[in-house]
């Protein structure tokens, strides 16, 4: 039996890409199971009801990711 979980989308920042079937890879701020909101990158169905696997990052992790991405872009 799959484990139940709750989530609340606090803020949607935007979409990184969209598949041919309309699924969007988005960056959102989400509270999982009534915990402190974290930054989340994953695919969402066109109606926003289904989600794919993703990655959840703390504020510190998102700041570290930004630094790494800035270095990659500068190459």
Image (spheres, rainbow, N blue to C red):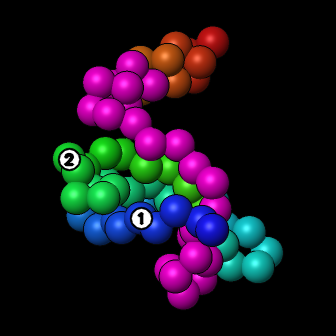
The answer to whether residue 52 is above or below residue 23 is above
Horizontal and vertical percent position of residue 49:
52, 82
Horizontal and vertical percent position of residue 70:
47, 21
Q: Is residue 12 visible?
A: no
Instruction: Indicate whether residue 31 is drawn in magenta.
Output: no
**Residue density around tag 2, few if under 14, some if 14–19, many if 20 or more, within 10 Å:** few
Q: Quadrant of the N terminus?
A: bottom right
Residue named by callout 2:
36
Horizontal and vertical percent position of residue 33:
30, 58
- The one of 47 and 33 positioned closer to us in this rendering: 33
Report helix, strand or loop for mark 2: loop
Q: Residue at x 59, y 18 (%)?
A: 72
The answer to whether residue 24 is above or below residue 71 is below
Q: Residue at x 22, y 58 (%)?
A: 34
Residue named by callout 1:
5
In whole angstroms, how far apart are the C-alphas of marks 2 and 1? 14 Å
- The one of 12 and 53 positioned closer to us in this rendering: 53
Quadrant of the rendered image containing residue 20: bottom right
- The one of 18 and 42 positioned closer to us in this rendering: 42
Q: Residue at x 36, y 45 (%)?
A: 39
Q: What is the total number of numbered labels drawn onto the structure image?
A: 2
Answer with left or right where residue 13 lies relative to residue 1: left
Quadrant of the rendered image containing residue 73: top right
Magenta segment: 44-65
Q: Quadrant of the C terminus?
A: top right
């Amino acid at each position: 039996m799959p484990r139940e979980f709750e989530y609340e989308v606090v803020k949607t920042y935007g979409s990184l890409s969209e598949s041919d079937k309309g699924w969007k890879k988005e960056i959102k701020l989400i509270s999982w199971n009534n915990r402190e909101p974290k930054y989340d990158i994953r695919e969402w169905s066109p109606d926003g009801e289904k989600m794919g696997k993703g990655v959840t990052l703390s504020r510190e992790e998102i700041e570290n990711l930004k630094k790494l991405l800035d270095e990659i872009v500068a190459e």
